[in-house]
Image (cartoon, grey):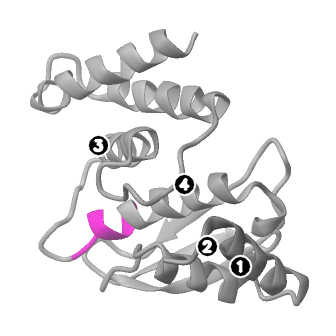
Amino acid sequence: MKAYQEIIQWVNSFHEQGETIQSAEFLINEYNLNHPNFKGFELREKAKPDFILMTTEGILGGPQIIRIPENTFEFPLNLMLNLLAHEMIHVQQKEKGNVVTDKNEREWQAYYENIFHIQFPQIPELSVFYKKACANKALDYYNRMEVGSELQLKYAEQKEEVEQLLKSLI
């Protein structure tokens, strides 16, 4: 993998040429995020600093498209890498034979990955601000699971990890 500063230069070069999709493709290849169930990127409306929306779209069990804002790379690269990793978790979760049907579980798993980088350890750490935001979003999705359900029990230990992390970030 290239050095982080070199990656930033590549991304900036793509961005200056208006090649947002090529930049995203470069990053998923550079950071080994690609997955056989990934069909490609499509652009969506520009993001705002307080609202950056990326989505994974496609039928469960079928190939997935990730829609990214046309101005994705105007934002901090480590944040964008974490958002791309989040969406690639969703691509995996929607693969035929590996479908995670519960939306709360899908989001829990993706936010947990953003916090702890278990599957994608090569992704840079988030700032404390964004770690807190992801931890709180993960807990929101955990709390949306049926109270005392098998799903909550399945993630009870991870929930404790997230709560401990939040306490340590205060």
The residue positioned 42% from the left and 67% from the top of the image is 88
Mark 4 touching mark 3, by CB under 8 A? no
Type of amino acid at the residue the image marks with label 3: Glu
- Mark 2 lies on a secondary structure that is strand
Label 4: few (<14), some (14–19) or many (≥20) C-alpha neighbours in 10 Å: many
Q: Is residue 38 above or below residue 48?
A: below
List the residue tagged with mark 1.
43
The part of the image, by quadrant, that contains residue 145 is top left
Which residue carries the number 2 mark? 67
Q: Main secondary structure of the magenta part?
A: helix
User: Horizontally, is 12 left or right of 80 in the view?
Assistant: right
Q: CA distance from mark 2 to mark 1?
A: 5 Å
In the picture as drawn, the residue positioned furthest to the right comes out as: 16
Residue extent of the magenta highlight: 90-95
Q: Amino acid at mark 2?
A: Arg
> Which sits earlier in the primary sequence, circle 1 or circle 4?
1
For mark 1, give the secondary structure: strand
Q: Which residue is mark 4?
A: 82
Image position, residue 116 (x, y; %): 38, 40
Where is residue 160? Give x, y as percent: 27, 17
Residue 155's mark? Answer: none
Q: Which residue is mark 3?
A: 105
Residue contact between numbered discs 2 and 1, judged by CB atoms under 8 Å: yes
- Could you give the CA–CA distance between mark 1 and mark 4, rounded to whole angstroms? 18 Å
Q: How many angstroms separate mark 4 from mark 2 (CA)?
A: 15 Å
Q: Amino acid at mark 4?
A: Asn
Considering depth in this image, is 36 or 150 the residue closer to the camera?
A: 36
Query: Looking at the image, is mark 4 or mark 2 earlier in the sequence?
Result: 2
Could you tell me how far apart the alpha carbons at marks 4 and 3 are, in whole angstroms?
Answer: 18 Å
